[in-house]
């Protein structure tokens, strides 16, 4: 994988594609892969650049930490070079502020597309925006040194990068509320036990575990994977009877396709 030419390599994000597998890497280990608006734009661009051959997207961070969250420079009066500071954004109109946050969120939304399965390989710190980026993925494999924390509330903010919906879905309202309001660390054993992590492994085995999971995800026919992911994604919003109907419709499409009667 490392010998392949990057499709994208800028602003702390590198995208490499190897046929059915894409790897998105956060590439600023010196700052523990701290996040910025430029990084978010690069992540959104990575999603747009995925070729149709890709079935599995692996997200990882270089160095000892997956991502320590938002770069605190965002809260300084100067902000980032060429960017409005967060303080400047707060002084703008409601419409402008809403549009800016919506743009930032685009970096966190495409991982849920039904035509791909996204896997976060998480080690070390995954704090705030880093936690939410891991939550944006369908699956999470974590190293035994992982430290999840949602620190936004303790800073007087809220988690606004699409993390609240998957967090509640994974661990329930009460536990999600407690994790967010206390800002405490969730370590590997607890993460696996409460459903934040699909698998926890020793740090030295993280790459192998992700590789094995990716191979298993690619073993099933793509169309069946796409239909199954779409069914599961919609299950929480549908009633029991609506889900039954959705299952029948999806299975009908699969049977016709297997019989050579599809569109």
Image (cartoon, rainbow, N blue to C red):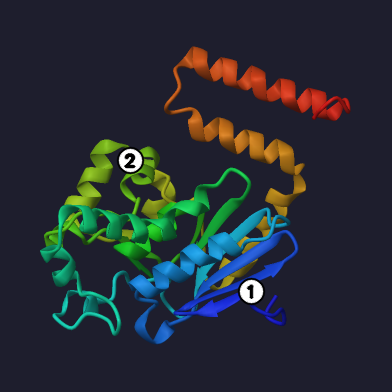
Rendering quarter of residue 187: bottom left
- Quarter in which the C terminus is drawn: top right
Quadrant where the N terminus lies? bottom right
Q: Which residue is mark 2?
A: 168
Near mark 2 (Cα within 10 A), the count class, few <14, some 14-19 or many ≥20, is some
Residue appearing at x 62%, y 21% in the figure: 247
What is the residue that sits farthest to the top in this orientation? 241
Q: Is residue 248 visible?
A: yes
Q: Is residue 247 above or below residue 195?
A: above
- From the viewer's perspective, is 82 left or right of 120? left
- The residue that appears at 33% across and 63% down in the rendered structure is 129
Q: Which residue is mark 1?
A: 7
**Above-or-below relation of 213 to 82:** above
Q: Position of residue 112 (x, y in %)?
A: 51, 48
Camera-side mark, 2 or 1: 1
Q: Residue furthest right?
A: 260
Residue 78 to residue 117: above or below: below
Q: Neighbour class for label 1 at 10 Å: few (<14), some, many (≥20)?
A: some
Residue 52 lies left or right of residue 150; in this view the side is right
* Element on which disc 2 rests: helix
In the displayed structure image, the side of residue 220 where residue 23 appears, left or right? left
């Amino acid at each position: 994988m490392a010998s392949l030419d990057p499709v994208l390599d800028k602003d702390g994000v590198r995208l490499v594609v190897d046929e059915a597998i894409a790897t998105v890497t956060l590439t600023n280990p010196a700052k523990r892969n701290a996040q910025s608006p430029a990084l978010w734009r690069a992540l959104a661009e990575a999603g747009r650049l995925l070729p149709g051959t890709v079935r599995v997207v692996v997200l990882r961070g270089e160095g000892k930490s997956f991502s320590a969250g938002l770069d605190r420079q965002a809260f300084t009066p100067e902000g980032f070079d060429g960017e409005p500071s967060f303080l400047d954004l707060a002084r703008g109109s409601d419409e402008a502020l809403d549009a800016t946050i919506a743009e930032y969120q685009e970096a966190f939304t495409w991982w849920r597309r039904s035509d791909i399965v996204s896997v976060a390989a998480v080690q070390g710190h995954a704090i705030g925006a880093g936690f939410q980026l891991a939550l944006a993925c369908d699956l999470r494999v974590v190293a035994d040194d992982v430290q999840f924390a949602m620190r936004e509330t303790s800073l007087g903010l809220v988690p606004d990068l699409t993390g609240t919906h998957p967090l509640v879905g994974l661990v329930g309202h009460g536990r999600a509320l407690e994790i967010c309001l206390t800002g405490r660390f969730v370590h590997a054993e607890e993460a696996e036990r409460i459903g934040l992590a699909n698998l926890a492994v020793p740090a030295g085995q993280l790459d192998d575990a992700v590789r094995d999971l990716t191979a298993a995800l690619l073993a099933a026919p793509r169309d069946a994977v796409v239909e199954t992911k779409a069914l599961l994604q919609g299950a929480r919003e549908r009633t029991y009877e609506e889900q039954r109907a959705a299952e029948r419709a999806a299975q009908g499409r699969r049977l016709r396709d297997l019989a050579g009667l599809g569109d």
